[in-house]
Structure formats: C-alpha cells, structure tokens
Amino acid sequence: MRLLTLTVTSLLFGLSLAALLSITSLVIILLKVSPLTVPAQAIPAFFLSLFLSISTVGSLLFLALWKWLPTHSWDAGRIMSVAIRQGVFLAIAVVILVLFHLWELLTWWIAILIFLVFGLIELALDQ
C-alpha cells in the first residue's frame, strides 16, 4: 500500500510539472512565434503544446473531480489512470475542434458531435 501511494504521489508531481511546462510552452508559442513568418514550425508546435497543455491540466482537473466526487470504490491508481485517459480524450477533442475551426468547417452541432463521440468512447471504456 505504501508503494502505491508513493507511486501515485510521484505521478501527481510529474503531471503537475508537465502541466506547468506545457502551459509555459503554449504561452511562449502564442506570444513569440508568428505563424505568418514560419508556418512550417509554428503551427505543429502550437498544436503539440495545445495538446500537452489541455491533456495535463485536464487530467489534473479530472483527478480532482474524481477525488471530490467518489462515485466508485476505486483505488488511487485506477483513479489516476482514468483521469489521465479522460484528459487525453479532452485534449484530442479540443485539438480536433481547433483544426476544424482552422479549416473553417466548425459549426456548433459538429462541436457537440465531437464531444459526444469522445464521451461515448469514455462511457464504453468505463464499463
């Protein structure tokens, strides 16, 4: 039990550090890199830092939500794995939304469908 607690604590610290670094990289890319001058490097760097920022912050928020609303009798490792999976799904959905907006294909019902698809995938994996 002590090893599991130590592992979850170190994972939480690593996830928090990754969130801080990824948000910092996103801010630097947004403020310092122009997609007009170097689009070959700026656009992929933006999407990568956006994905990392949303997945790490989303994982931390989902972890806090699962700790605050204990609806299942899961151990700490299971809660951490579910929160990371949900954070990654959230990041994929948001990156797809931003890509659709970039390609001028995004409407409100497409956004709802994208989140609905990832919500249904999460419900299927939760069972």
Image (cartoon, rainbow, N blue to C red):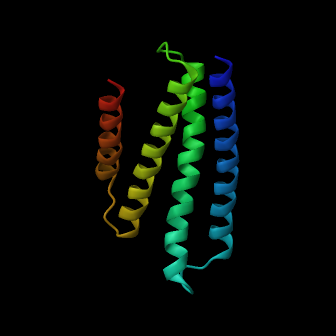
Task: Please indicate whether residue 15 sits to the left or right of residue 122 in the image.
Answer: right
Task: Name the residue at 50% across, 17% down.
Answer: 74
Question: Residue 17 in the image: x percent, y percent?
Answer: 70, 47
Task: Name the residue at 70% across, 50% down.
Answer: 20
Q: Residue reaching furthest top? A: 73
Vertical side of 122 occupied by 19: above or below? below
Task: Name the residue at 68% across, 75% down.
Answer: 32
> If the image is split into quadrants, where does the C terminus sit?
top left
Task: Please indicate whether residue 113 sits to the left or right of residue 92 in the image.
Answer: left
Q: Residue reaching furthest bottom? A: 37
Task: Name the residue at 47% across, 15% down.
Answer: 72
> If the image is split into quadrants, where does the N terminus sit?
top right
Question: Residue 103 in the image: x percent, y percent?
Answer: 35, 70
Q: To which quarter of the image does residue 68 belong?
A: top right
Q: Residue reaching furthest front? A: 3
Question: Residue 56 in the image: x percent, y percent?
Answer: 58, 46
Q: To which quarter of the image does residue 31 belong?
A: bottom right
Question: Residue 120 in the image: x percent, y percent?
Answer: 30, 35
Q: Which of 68 and 12 is in front in this view?
A: 12
Vertical side of 37 occupied by 69: above or below? above
Task: Please indicate whether residue 100 sits to the left or right of residue 48 in the image.
Answer: left
Query: What count of labels does the image hold?
Result: 0
